[in-house]
Image (tube, rainbow, N blue to C red):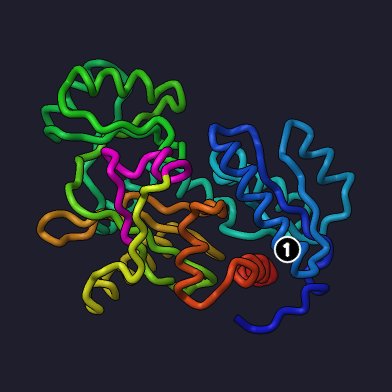
Amino acid sequence: MATVDVKSFGRVAVLYGGISAEREVSLRSGAAVLAALQTAGVDAFGIDVQADIVRRISAEKIDRAFIVLHGRGGEDGTIQGLLEWAGIPYTGSKVLASALAMDKLRTKQVWSSLGIPTPQHSVLSSVEDCAAAAEKLGFPLIVKPAQEGSSIGMAKVNNLQELEQAWQAARHYDRNVLVEQWITGPEFTIAMLDGEILPPIRLGTNREFYDYEAKYLADDTQYQIPCGLSPEREQELKELTRQACETLGVTGWGRADVMQDEQGNFWLLEVNTTPGMTDHSLVPMAAKAHGLNFSQLVLTVLASSMKG
């Protein structure tokens, strides 16, 4: 990482917390980012984003914003649009890419239209849709709210009764509920930082899948880095991640989640445009393997807000 004059950032607002289902994760991410910036000498302060955010942004002197909001209101283009109107540079993807990547359904439609591999899916809005999806896709399946992160509202299902129950639970989070073919095999996560693809991480968990508990609470989740792939397959995975980000317009930083099936094929699941920055988070792990400590990672993300 090139040497950065921290004074050139000006006064930096770290936006975190928010009102989405991922609030608790965002509070932890934001606290870690704010502490790292302040320790590095950046004139940074935190804003827990609530209903008064327009007033707060108008009242404060803010030269740029570091967005560490996860989920609705922070990762979906909403806060990005507000900052655009206020003329405040910010970290991460712009309005369109943020909104598109947040919507798993629209993301899959873009990838499918371009021939980029992503699991077959259906959209659930009724009990009848559940039966049709079961007929089309078979079991097992995984159910997801279309616009939630951190695996909130997700469930693996093995029969029609479980599918209907999972749909009922997921629609409390989003009226659009996605159901996908279950891919049996290892899961990988790959970070993008300032246009560079970082070393992939292979994930392991004793739970059904890499769910909220495995991500943030469990102490037995395994993180394999190097990921165990051959150099050729690892490069293939990196290029798939680059393609996934570029087709959605993701910039600054992000993280793609990918499954590998029993035949060795890769399948894109989603791209996160504001990844977690907690002590269990994956982008800091990938950055460390790339030679960047947490402070350098945070400064690199912040420096990307000065481009364009």
Give the quadrant of the N terminus.
bottom right
Total count of labels: 1
Q: Is residue 118 left or right of residue 58?
A: left
Viewer can see residue 274? no
Q: Is residue 102 above or below residue 235?
A: above
Q: Residue 137 appears at what percent x and percent y? A: 14, 35
Residue type at mark 1 is Leu
Is 198 rendered above or below residue 210?
A: below
Q: Residue furthest front?
A: 219
Q: Quadrant of residue 34?
A: bottom right
| Direction from residue 164 to residue 34 in the image, left or right | right
Residue sitting at x 26%, y 38%: 208
In x, y percent, where is residue 224?
33, 63
Extent of the magenta region: 202-218
Q: Which residue is mark 1?
A: 37
Name which residue lies at 15% across and 24% down: 159
Residue 232 quadrant: bottom left
